[in-house]
Image (tube, rainbow, N blue to C red):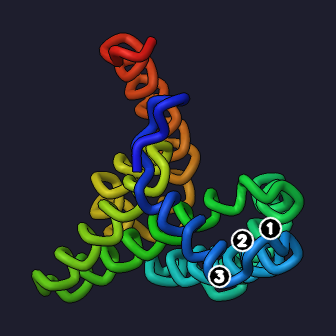
Amino acid sequence: AFWPVSGRFRPVELYEWALKYAAFGLHPLLYHLLDILKWAACAWAFRRFLIRLAFSEDLANLAGAIMLISPSGLEALYNITSGNLSTAVLLMLFALIAYARYLEEEKLYHLCISGAWFVLAALSREGTLMALPLFALMPLMKKKPLHQRALWIPFAIAFSYGFMAFVSEAWVYFSPLY
């Protein structure tokens, strides 16, 4: 589960590769088809997440369609090694959806499910830690009217990127591999 060359710990990614190889052997077309399905599931999950945040269904559909054709999605389709990005994104979106459901219903098991999805996402790719600030901002976003909620999105994205830059620098500074 530890990639000795890069110094990354990604057990979910390693297991995914093992499952793909066991199911498809060395047939890259099947890997690409699976990656296309995963990215489509990401777009659907992003749509569901926006609906959970009480955005309109039309806006959520548009955002899901944009995500479907985004450069990250296209990279996952033509670069076989980027398919694991869609796994990490999908797991993180599941965590955010479960957390949004926890905020609505205040049932502890939704919080536990969200935590489990988050851990799996973090074990898939360390970059998913970028979404961590969204968990803190979601309670603030849900209580605002739609026009004010939309203003939080650029702030949340910028805050997430800043948080990830900090985590990345800390990793490089404290890692024995660098």
**What's the residue type where badge 2 is placed?**
Ala
Q: Residue at x 46, y 50 (%)?
A: 128
Q: Are marks 2 and 1 in contact (CB under 8 Å)?
A: yes
Q: Earlier in the sequence, mark 3 or mark 1?
A: 3
Determine crowd level at label 1: few under 14, some 14-19, many 20+ residues with C-alpha closer than 10 A: few
Q: Are marks 2 and 3 in contact (CB under 8 Å)?
A: no
Vertical relation: 95 (above or below) 156:
below
Q: Secondary structure at mark 1?
A: helix
Determine crowd level at label 3: few under 14, some 14-19, many 20+ residues with C-alpha closer than 10 A: some
Q: Which mark is residue 63?
A: 2
* Residue 6 point in image, percent of width and height: 53, 30
**What's the residue type where badge 1 is placed?**
Ile
Vertical relation: 170 (above or below) 9:
above
Vertical relation: 151 (above or below) 12:
above
**What's the residue type where badge 3 is placed?**
Ala
Q: Is residue 121 left or right of residue 56?
A: left
* Residue 82 point in image, percent of width and height: 72, 54
* Residue position marked by numbered label 3 in the rendering: 41
Q: Residue at x 54, y 53 (%)?
A: 153
* Residue position marked by numbered label 1 in the rendering: 66
Vertical relation: 97 (above or below) 161:
below
Q: Secondary structure at mark 2?
A: helix
Determine crowd level at label 2: few under 14, some 14-19, many 20+ residues with C-alpha closer than 10 A: some
Please name whichever residue, 172 or 99, is drawn nearer the observer in this view of the structure. Answer: 172
Query: Foreground mark, 2 or 3?
Result: 3
- In the picture as drawn, the residue positioned furthest to the left comes out as 108
